[in-house]
Image: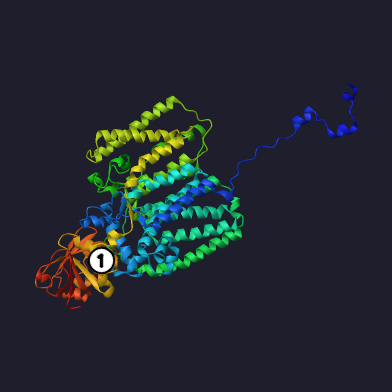
């Protein structure tokens, strides 16, 4: 025992003792606070890289195989074929005639004409420049969606350009939400697909998505320029910023762009307030400044060049009767349209309330802001907590509601530039903001640990939500003269109410993934809006296109005109002729050819000073009379003698008739082909 009690001095040094008092007094290091790593704003882990790589690979592979979702197959159908030969799956939508009948033939024709800055077939001025057609100009270096036209044949080039809007939207929106939700991967994936599959994006052929691509790029790149300090990351962010601001500037469509810019400005403001850590802005300040200066310098030079080749054309547009200088103060939204997507599952291109005009005008985003507003208010009352991003997004929604429902004073509409956005366009961007608000809310992982589920609140809320949704549905039934059935209203009420309750209780286990799947399910039917097609044979191999192709090659400078037997059929065929690069006198003109019209009419009539479908009809009275007939805000017909010397003065060499012409109509012409189409050449040219 003595040996165990008394130890040597060496042993005591090796095993020093510490008193209990000393242990208690020893400081315990505090747990490190969670710090936002500026170099990992978006966490590019394996699943993120795989997701992005999969989308990029799909984009390349599908485009190389000439796969796209254009409704170009309609040309087969209107030509009398039993089915569209280019369609792999789905149905080409006739309602999207702005795309398949007008836009796509014009783009293909622009390619076949050599991609000039000016193409009289599409109107006066430099139409291809301001409408985003492929052009042989230095500004195309900053238009990545058009690069394919300098690399591939026309079918693959078209597919790459078309699919750019799909896949780069999905990638950029996913990355945006990864930033907003602090790398909530699955919610970010759900957000990208939910917004893309929303009716307003699909029925307007991705127009909203194409604008959001560039705003996503601006948001992400500026965040990286502010919060990142690695030089290589700053350079990449600068390149993305340059392409993004150029994309917005070179593809102007103010009705959507103006409210979208406000949405992103408010979202960015909330993001900065939430993240704070402003000191990081100064890190590697020299590199940040040089990158930003380089971006501004290159963009400034490019913008000035773009201005010089587009200013006169924009001036022509602004001085038209339609679209002209639109001025809106809002407040004129059609009754029932605010929540129209509650019945979206029951609408199609052939089934839509007459009050909403057509499926494109009726389409929107499903509105979820009421339940999110409720949760924001509840959390503030209970916990005195506010999320800056949620607040800023809510402000956007509230301002949007005021604009579309009540309107702004004229001075405020003008000062805010919202005067260029009618309520019928603002509602769709309000819906987009509502969708961003929804998925930011779902992706916010900062759940309050104090929150407990109570049956009392659930019961009261369930009843309140059901009553609210039912009231909205009843209002829609009244606004549409009971277009939808009571059974459809009940189903819509139950589905929307269920989604609202899932959103409210998203903090509880498994509710958020269930909510995301449920929400995607509500939009999944919109995946069938566009067909899956391959190639452009419906257009390129159309008999009329093939018949006129050789004639165009022999006389590429010749001008053509198409006379129709009924309203707008001549205009449609004229659009078809554009495919070969032919300079067609009529068809759709984005900008009115006022100099041409001055040859036909010296009065400078407002009938033709507009974006319009121009149809030509025979009218012979022996006095070379020309009669203009208005056909609506975007169309008119010209009635005149096909042998009029005025057409000779306009350089028209070939005439196509959609019907078998009478001898007096072709008295000045020689037949070229009358086997199926009636193609004649004027003898005076």
Quadrant location of residue 28? top right
Taking the image as drawn, is residue 372 in sight? no
Q: Position of residue 563 (x, y in %)?
A: 17, 66
In the picture, measured across the screen, residue 302 lies left or right of residue 449, that is: left
Q: Say above or below: 639 vs 9.
A: below
Taking the image as drawn, is residue 158 in sight? yes
Q: Quadrant of the N terminus?
A: top right
Tag 1's secondary structure? helix
Q: Position of residue 346 (x, y in %)?
A: 28, 40
Of the pair 134 and 395, the residue shown nearer to us:
134
In the picture, measured across the screen, residue 165 lies left or right of residue 353, that is: right
* Residue receiving disc 1: 546
- Residue appearing at x 33%, y 33% in the figure: 494
Q: Residues within 10 Å of mark 1 (few under 14, many from 20)?
A: some
- Residue appearing at x 10%, y 69% in the figure: 620
Of the pair 68 and 649, the residue shown nearer to us:
68
Q: Residue furthest bottom?
A: 684
Of the pair 75 and 685, the residue shown nearer to us:
75
Q: Quadrant of the C terminus?
A: bottom left
In the picture, measured across the screen, residue 602 lies left or right of residue 343, that is: left
- Residue appearing at x 58%, y 50% in the figure: 38
């Amino acid at each position: 025992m003595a040996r165990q009690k008394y130890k040597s001095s060496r042993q005591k040094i090796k095993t020093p003792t510490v008193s209990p008092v000393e242990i208690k007094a020893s400081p315990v290091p505090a747990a490190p606070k969670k710090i936002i790593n500026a170099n990992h704003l978006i966490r590019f882990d394996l699943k993120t890289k795989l997701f992005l790589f999969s989308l990029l690979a799909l984009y390349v592979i599908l485009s190389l195989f000439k796969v796209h979702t254009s409704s170009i197959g309609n040309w087969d159908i209107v030509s009398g074929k039993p089915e569209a030969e280019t369609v792999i799956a789905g149905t080409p939508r006739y309602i999207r005639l702005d795309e398949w009948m007008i836009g796509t033939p014009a783009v293909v024709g622009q390619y076949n004409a050599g991609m000039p800055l000016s193409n009289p077939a599409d109107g006066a001025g430099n139409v291809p420049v301001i409408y985003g057609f492929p052009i042989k100009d230095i500004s195309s270096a900053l238009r990545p969606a058009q690069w394919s036209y300098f690399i591939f044949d026309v079918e693959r080039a078209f597919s790459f350009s078309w699919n750019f809007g799909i896949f780069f939207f999905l990638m950029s929106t996913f990355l945006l939400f990864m930033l907003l939700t602090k790398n909530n991967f699955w919610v970010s994936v759900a957000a990208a697909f939910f917004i893309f599959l929303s009716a307003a994006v699909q029925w307007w052929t991705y127009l909203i998505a194409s604008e959001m691509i560039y705003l996503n790029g601006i948001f992400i790149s500026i965040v990286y320029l502010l919060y990142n300090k690695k030089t290589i990351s700053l350079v990449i962010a600068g390149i993305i910023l340059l392409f993004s601001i150029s994309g917005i500037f070179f593809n102007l469509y103010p009705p959507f762009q103006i409210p979208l810019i406000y949405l992103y400005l408010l979202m960015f403001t909330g993001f900065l307030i939430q993240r704070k850590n402003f000191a990081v802005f100064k890190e590697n300040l020299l590199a940040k400044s040089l990158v930003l200066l380089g971006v501004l310098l290159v963009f400034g030079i490019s913008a000035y060049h773009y201005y010089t080749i587009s200013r006169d054309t924009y001036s022509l547009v602004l001085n038209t009767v339609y679209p002209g200088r639109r001025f809106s103060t809002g407040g004129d939204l059609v009754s029932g349209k605010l929540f129209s997507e509650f019945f979206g599952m029951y609408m199609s291109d052939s089934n839509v309330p007459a009050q909403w005009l057509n499926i494109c005008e009726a389409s929107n985003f499903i509105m979820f802001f009421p339940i999110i507003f409720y949760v924001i208010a509840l959390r503030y009352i209970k916990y005195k907590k506010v999320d800056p991003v949620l607040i800023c997004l809510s402000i956007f929604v509230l301002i949007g509601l005021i604009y579309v429902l009540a309107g702004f004073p004229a001075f405020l509409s003008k000062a805010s530039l919202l005067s260029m956005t009618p309520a019928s366009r603002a509602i769709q961007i309000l819906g987009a903001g509502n969708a961003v608000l929804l998925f930011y809310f779902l992706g916010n992982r900062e759940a309050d640990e104090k929150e407990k589920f109570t049956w009392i609140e659930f019961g009261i809320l369930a009843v309140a939500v059901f009553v609210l949704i039912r009231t909205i549905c009843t209002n829609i039934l009244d606004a549409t003269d009971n277009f939808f059935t009571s059974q459809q209203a009940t189903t819509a009420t139950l589905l929307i109410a269920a989604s609202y309750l899932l959103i409210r209780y998203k903090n509880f286990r498994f509710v958020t993934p269930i909510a995301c799947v449920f929400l995607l399910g509500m939009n999944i039917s919109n995946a069938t809006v566009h067909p899956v097609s391959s190639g452009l044979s419906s257009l390129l191999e159309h008999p009329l296109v093939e018949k006129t192709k050789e004639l165009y090659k022999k006389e590429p400078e010749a001008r053509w005109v198409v006379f129709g037997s009924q309203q707008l059929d001549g205009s449609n065929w004229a659009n078809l002729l554009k495919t070969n690069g032919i300079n067609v006198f009529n068809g759709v003109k984005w900008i009115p050819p006022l100099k041409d019209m001055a040859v036909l009419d010296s009065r400078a009539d407002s009938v033709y000073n507009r974006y319009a479908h121009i149809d030509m009809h025979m009218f012979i009275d022996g006095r070379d009379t020309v009669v203009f007939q208005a056909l609506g805000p975007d169309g008119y017909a010209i009635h005149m003698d096909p042998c009029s010397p005025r057409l000779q003065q306009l350089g028209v060499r070939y005439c196509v008739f959609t019907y078998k012409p009478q001898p007096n109509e072709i008295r000045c012409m020689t037949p070229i082909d009358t086997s199926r189409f009636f193609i004649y050449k004027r003898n005076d040219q």
